[in-house]
Image: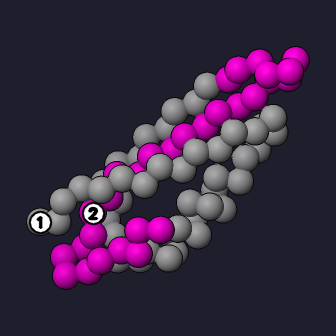
Amino acid sequence: MNPLKVKIFTYFSMNINPPNEIQINRWLAENPDIEVVDIVQSESMAVKTGEMERNLSITLVYRDKEGKKSKRT
C-alpha cells in the first residue's frame, strides 16, 4: 500500500465565494491516479482594515494508486 500524502489548498478573501472549487477540481483532474482518503476543512475570519477577511483551508489526504505516481503539483 502506498503512503498517505496531503495537498493543502488555502485561500484568503474578502469575498464569500472563493474559487477553491475550481482549483481543487483542476488539481484532481491533473492527478487521476490518486485515491482520496479524507478531506478536512478549516475556516476562520479576521478583521483587516475594517473588513472581514475569510481564511479557508482545505486539506486532501490521498495516496497514489498502486503502480501510479501523481503529479503532486
Which of the two residues, 10 or 58, is positioned nearer the viewer here?
10
Q: Which image quadrant for residue 68?
A: bottom left
Decide whether residue 62 is among the magenta residues: yes
Q: Estimate the x, y position of residue 55 in percent, counting from the top left.
A: 64, 33
Q: Residues within 10 Å of mark 1 (few under 14, many from 20)?
A: few
Report the amino acid beneath label 1. Met
Report the amino acid beneath label 2. Arg
CB atoms of marks 2 and 1 within 8 Å: yes
Which residue is at the far front? Answer: 49
How many numbered discs sit on the rendered protein?
Answer: 2
**Residue 53 horizontal side relative to residue 50, left or right:** left
Q: Estimate the x, y position of residue 20 in percent, counting from the top left.
A: 64, 52
Badge number at residue 1: 1
Earlier-in-chain disc, 2 versus 1 = 1
Q: Residue at x 75, y 28 (%)?
A: 53
Which of the two residues, 50 or 37, is positioned nearer the viewer here?
50
Q: Estimate the x, y position of residue 28 in percent, counting from the top left.
A: 49, 68
Q: What quarter of the picture does the N terminus occupy? A: bottom left
Decide whether residue 70 is among the magenta residues: yes
Q: Taken as a whole, is the magenta stretch helix, strand or loop?
A: strand
Which residue is at the far bottom? Answer: 67
Q: Estimate the x, y position of residue 44 in percent, counting from the top left.
A: 61, 25
| Marks 2/1: CA–CA distance | 9 Å
Magenta span:
45-73
**Residue 12 horizontal side relative to residue 72, left or right:** right
Instruction: Give above or below for 45 relative to 42.
Output: above
Identify residue for label 2: 63
